[in-house]
Image (cartoon, helix red, strand yellow):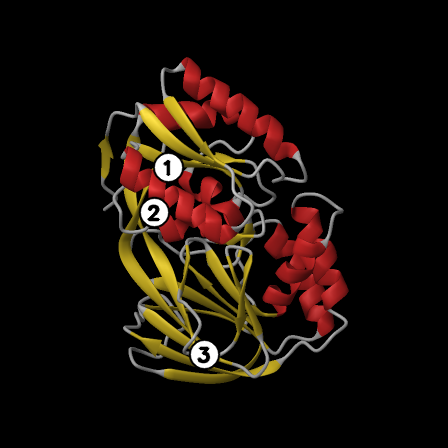
Amino acid sequence: MTQYSSRSVRAVTVVTNRHAGLGAGHDVATAALARLRERGVEVAEVRAPSAAETVRLVRDSIARDNPDAVVCIGGDGLINVTLDAVAHTGVPLGLVPAGTGNDLARELGVPTEDPVAAADLVAQGRTRTIDLGRIELSEPESAPMWFVTVAGTGFDARVTLRANAMRWPRGRLRYTAAALAEISGRLTVPYRVELTGAVTEGLTNPGAGSTVETNAVMVAVGNTRTYGGGMLICPDAVLDDGLLDLTVVGALSRWEMLRLLPALSAGKRQNHPEVKQYRAAAITLTAQGAPATADGEPVGTLPITIRAVPSALTVLVP
């Protein structure tokens, strides 16, 4: 059962991406920061030129200033960067959505179109603890990567990478346009899926410690239910169950994919016989040359191992 608590929020470290949402981030940040100051919250703003510098500055601020919360004003990508600094610290993460997808905010019930209301939630100080996913790549020199929403591989990772490079259209339509562009390429590849600590109830799951070998268009691993601005890819994922949900989209034809994509974009549950759901504590995915993304950010290529990390992040919620 989800547990909530409350804390006083008097000083925050704010991480901003004023270019988020194709430039909308500037107006969102201005409104949110003004509201926090109206509420008597002391604000220290972090604006850095790189992900590594963002992490360093937020870590320094936590150690030096002991803020009551770290607040991200941006999208899921900025949250992903900030996880390295806040995971396992107990310092709550607040959200003021300003990105394209804002899927974590949607999952938590944080307003996505009202920065003043989102800032009020930060000042209110209500918290809950959620899980994170941890990605380990096969290359020994590669550092593990946190994520909080969904890790995509195969077709959906290619779509995300293409969408990230597009300037138009805006919002969820960008993912649809990228999907239509990618669908002409190679779709199905052989996957090997190894499940550790698997759960079978209500799912197409073969059991703990099992291996699934299948041809698939894509495989998504969700800590949350949606990605890409509301696409319902892991419909039964729960943020604090200590497990990850896995959706395998099997060997669909291009025509079948064209029929599937609008339903996914509309947030509808999929009952196609080639769409299978699993749940496990850890998952290893192998598929030659398949790319991976997490929270919309590039990860690398398979193989990767993804683990659920229970109670790794405290967040501010309604």
The residue at which mark 3 appears reads as 139
Residue 243: x and y in percent read 32, 62
- Residue name at image x 23 percent, y 46 percent: 1
Between discs 2 and 3, the one toward the N terminus: 2
- Residue name at image x 61 percent, y 49 percent: 266
- Residue name at image x 43 percent, y 13 percent: 38
Q: Which residue type does callout 2 highlight?
A: Val
Element on which disc 2 rests: helix
**Residue 11 in view of the camera:** yes
Mark 2 → mark 3, Cα distance in angstroms? 25 Å
Tell me whether the residue at label 1 lies in contact with that at label 2, contact meaning CB atoms closer than 8 angstroms: yes
The 10 Å Cα crowd at callout 1, few under 14, some 14 to 19, many 20 or more, is many
**Residue 242 in view of the camera:** no
Which of these two is toward me, 166 or 109?
A: 166
The residue at which mark 1 appears reads as 70
Asked if 2 appears above or below 225 in the picture, the reply is above
Residue 197: x and y in percent read 27, 73
The residue at which mark 2 appears reads as 86
